[in-house]
Image (cartoon, helix red, strand yellow):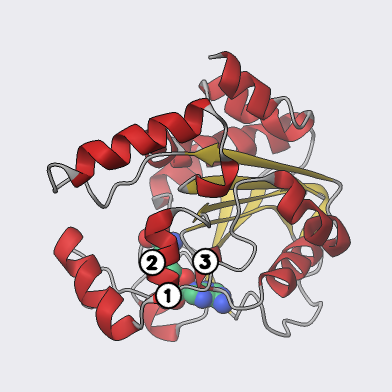
Amino acid sequence: MARSERRLAESTSVAEPLRRLGYDSDTDWAWDNYKASVLALVEHCREAGRTGADGLVRALEIGGGRTPLLTADEARAAGVAYTVNDISDRELALAPAEFAKARFDVAGDIGSAEAGGYDLVFSKMVLEHVRDARQAWRNTAMLLAPGGFALAFHPALYSPVFVLNRMLPESLSAPLLRFFMPYRHDEDSPKFPAYYDLCRAKASLVEPALKDAGFSEVLCAPFWGCVYFRKLPGLRELSAAFCALAEARDWRLVADYAYTIAKK
Ligand SMILES: C[S@@+](CC[C@H](N)C(=O)[O-])C[C@H]1O[C@@H](n2cnc3c(N)ncnc32)[C@H](O)[C@@H]1O
C-alpha cells in the first residue's frame, strides 16, 4: 500500500527488513510479524557482515523474562547467539535454560563490560515499563557494536486506551486489563506499571533523544488498531472506525503501537 511505503521511506537502511516482509500498518500485522521482523534484522546483520567471530549474530532480548521471543531451536536455526535480559531474577529463572541470562535494569547503571558486545538488541512490550527511556536507549547504543541495530515493539501515546492506562491508578487498571484479557493474571502474564516514556509512533518525536544516545538512523513504524475493545460490540466498531480514519490520515499521535528501529 502506498501509505505503508511512504511510512517506510522515512528511513533508508533500517526500513529494508520490514519492506521485505510486506509491512502493513494494522496492529494485527505488528503482533503476527514481530518474530519475523526480528529474524529479518538478524539476516540484515549477517548480510552486512555484522556478526561475532564465530559467525553468529549476537542478539540480546531486553525484558525477555519467562517468555523470550525465540525458542532455542529457532535461535539455533537462525544462527543467533541469544542472551535474555530481565530486571527480575524471578522472570529469568523461568526463562529457558538453553539461553545465556543477563540480569540488569536496562535504564540503570550497567557499566561498560559488555560494550559493543551485541549486533542486535530488541524488546517486546518492555519500553513502556521503563521510567527513563533516554537512559535505556543510551545503554542500548553502548551495548551495540558499530552498525548494530535496535528494535523495540511498544504501545504508543496518545492512543486513547494507553492514555487511560497511564492516567488510572494500578488498582483500577489491573482489574480492567483482566476483564478485557482474562489470561493477564500474575501467575502467567503479570501486569507491570507503564510510563510510556519515549513510546511514540512518530520519528521526529524520538529521533533527537535516540541520536543523542548514539544512533545514526531512526524509523518509527506506526500501527493502528486497538485489541482491547474487540469483545465489546458497539465500542469495537467505534474503535475500528476511528483507527481506520487515523490510519488513512496518518494521525501518528493516536497510533496504538510502533516498532522503533534504530541503527548505531
Ligand atoms: C510486559 S512483560 C513482557 C515480557 C516479554 N517481552 C513478552 O513480550 O512476553 C515486561 C518485561 O520487562 C521486564 N522489565 C521491566 N522493566 C525492565 C527494565 N527496566 N529492564 C529490564 N527488564 C525490565 C519485566 O520484568 C518483564 O519481564
**Amino acid on which disc 3 is placed:** Glu
**Amino acid on which disc 2 is placed:** Leu
Residue 44 % position (x, y): 69, 32
Is tag 1's residue or tag 3's residue first in the polypeptide sequence?
A: 3
Instruction: Judge by depth and name the residue closer to the eye, 19 or 132.
Output: 132
| Residue 33 appears in the rendering | yes
Position of residue 116 in the picture relative to residue 193 (left or right): right
**Amino acid on which disc 1 is placed:** Met
Tell me if residue 177 comes above or below residue 122 in the rendering.
below
Instruction: Judge by depth and name the residue closer to the eye, 252 or 215.
Output: 252
Residue 251 % position (x, y): 56, 38
Residue at image point 63% right, 48% down: 260
Distance CA(mark 2)–CA(mark 1): 5 Å
Q: Are marks 2 and 1 in contact (CB under 8 Å)?
A: yes
Residue located beneath label 1 in the image: 167
Q: State which quadrant residue 180 falls in.
A: bottom left
Instruction: Judge by depth and name the residue closer to the eye, 137 or 48.
Output: 137
Label 3 CB less than 8 angstroms from ligand 1: no
Residue at image point 59% right, 14% down: 2
| Residue 97 appears in the rendering | no
Residue located beneath label 2 in the image: 164
- How crowded pointer 3 is (Cα within 10 Å; few <14, some 14-19, many 20+) is rated as many
Distance CA(mark 3)–CA(mark 2): 14 Å
Is tag 3's residue or tag 2's residue first in the polypeptide sequence?
A: 3
Q: Is mark 2 on a helix, strand or loop?
A: helix
Residue located beneath label 3 in the image: 128
